Structure formats: structure tokens, C-alpha cells
Amino acid sequence: MPQPSPSPDLDQLPQPLLAAAQAARREFLVALEPLRGELFRYCRRLTGSVWDAEDLAQEALARAFTRAAQTHQPVERPMAWLVRIATNAYLDQVRRPAPLLVEPAEQAAPAAADPAEVRDALAEMSTLLAPQERAAVVLKDVFDLPLKEIAAMLSTTEGAVKAALHRGRGRLADPQREAALARRTGPDRQTLDALATAFTAYDLDGLTKLFVEDAVSDVIGVAHEVGRAQIAAGSLHHTLVLEPSVRWRAEVRELDGDPLVLMWATPADGSGPEAVEDILRAETADGGITRLRWYYFCPDVLTETGDRLDVPVRTHGHTV
């Protein structure tokens, strides 16, 4: 059966349509700005990782924008609305094929742990709990939400939530819990050192060559670039050529055993001291960068990383 050929009118989306979509998204994000910090903190506790938390927050906001366009009733309690969307996004990302929360409903949950201890445990053991258990423990032991509300968020029963709490709290209290943790393979340190050296030297050509041909670059929340040429002409050119207001210096540091690149900036006019204004995280393969994430527009990530590494930071909000 012959396949219909694409309409010439659809070879490219109209620029006014893209501009309208971008303007609507920006207006939506500005309206939610007062809730961004709380949303990030929820995602941080749910995922146990500053990086995964930012990814989840971005996914939740993207879904919320789509959901808002499909909603014909007022959105009451927008923070609770965002938490529900973030929770569903988290479960969708990591959900296993097994049915949700299947332990016997009559099993009682042990007493709640101290919230501070729960937060520390979740931060250290992001791979220990099953997704549903993690969501239940965070929503109950950190946010102290009623079981009925948690059950609604997880699309299950109160008894199943109690069972998930029982399992999750039990795993957090297991003295052998560290043996259950598995670490991810980190990026190649030599490649990251070369990345930092090229940035500091303002070597655009050398920097470009570090990327594989089909690499991806994400300026989180702002821009998505695909391919070495697009990255070179976009984020790399903007940073090294179109930003004369600061002088960049890149440095590789480690956080939780994973290397990352701190982008130190010194105002060219001498109006302030050197401070970290961006953080880069790379994925590598065969000595080349396959994906680069920029956290310039992620103030919560910059603030936490600066606090934990004891370095000064300057933030610039969430949007251009």
C-alpha cells in the first residue's frame, strides 16, 4: 500500500506558531516561579539525587504545561497539582511491570522514622527502594500527607500505601542496606579534564572536537541541541564568543563520587569576585562526549552544589 507523502506545508512549522508556543510556555513558567523551589525540594527527596531531581522537576513542568492546555476548570491548590504530576512522572520513569503496591493491605506499617533521617537515607540510597515504596515514604514521612491523599496520588488503596510504607521503612532500616546499592558508571575523567581545559583556553575548535557527531546538548529548561555542528554554533559559541561580560574558567570537581565541571565566571568589568555560574555534567563513550547538560538556569542545583562543595555561586533564575 503506498504511503502518503508529507504535505509541503508541514515541512517546517510556522515560525509564528513556534514563537507563540515559546511565549505561552514562558508566561506559564513565570506564573509558577514562586512554587519552583518547593517543587525541586519534593523531587529532590523523591529521587535522592540533585541531578535527577532537576530532571524530574523539568519533566513535571512540561507535563503541567500540557495538562493546563487541556484543563477547562480552575486549577486549585497548584502546588498539590504539581506534586501529583511530579509523582506520576517519577513512577512512569521507573515503574516496573509488576502491579503497583501489591503487598497485603492488612499489613501494618511501623512507626514513622524521623523526617531528617529519612531525608538523609533517601539522599544516600536513591537505588534502594522500589519506586512506589520511595514515593510512599517521601509523601508520608517527609511531607506527612494523609494516607488517603497519598493513595489518590499513587492510584491505589490506603492499605496498599501502608504495605509500601512497611516495606520501604524496613529496607531503610536494614543494616545490610549498603550492599544493595549499585553505582552508575561515571563519565571518562580524561575527557572531562580535556573539556575543562578547552573551555578555560577558549578553544572552540578543540572543544567541538570532543563531541561525537550525534551528541546532544541540553541547556536545562531553555535549549536542546542535537549534533556536533548545532552544539558548536549554539551553546558553545554563545558561551565563548557572545558572552563578553564574564571570563570563564572551568574546573573538574567531584560530588558524591561523580565528576562534574564547575564553570567559574569573573565579571569582565571587575564588579564582583569569581563565582560558579554554571555546572556541566557529561556522558561519554569511547573518549567522546555523547551528552552535555548545562545547569545555568537551575538555581536550586547551583545553590545545593555550591553549599556541598563550599564554593561561591551566582544564580540567574530559571529562564532567559
Image (cartoon, rainbow, N blue to C red):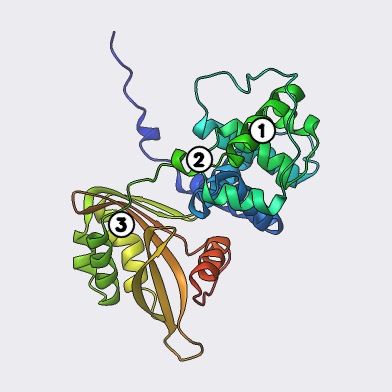
Image-quadrant location for residue 66: top right
> Could one spot residue 39 in this view of the protein?
no
Q: In this view, does 104 lie to the left or right of 217?
A: right
Q: Report the Cα–Cα distance between label 3 and label 1.
A: 34 Å
Q: Residue 176 carries which label?
A: 2
Image-quadrant location for residue 182: top left
Element under disc 2: loop
Q: Decide: marks 3, 2 in contact (CB < 8 A)? A: no
Amino acid type indicated by mark 2: Gln
Amino acid type indicated by mark 1: Gln
Q: In this view of the protein, which residue sits in the foreground, 273 or 160?
A: 160
Q: Which residue is drawn at 57% across and 39% down?
A: 174
Q: Which residue is drawn at 49% across and 40% down?
A: 127
Between circles 1 and 2, the one closer to the viewer is: 2
Q: Name the residue under label 3.
A: 231
Q: Earlier in the sequence, mark 3 or mark 2?
A: 2
Q: Is residue 243 left or right of residue 189?
A: right
Q: In this view, does 133 lie to the left or right of 71?
A: left
> Could one spot residue 133 in this view of the protein?
yes
| Position above or below: 111 against 208 | above
Q: Report the Cα–Cα distance between label 3 and label 2.
A: 45 Å
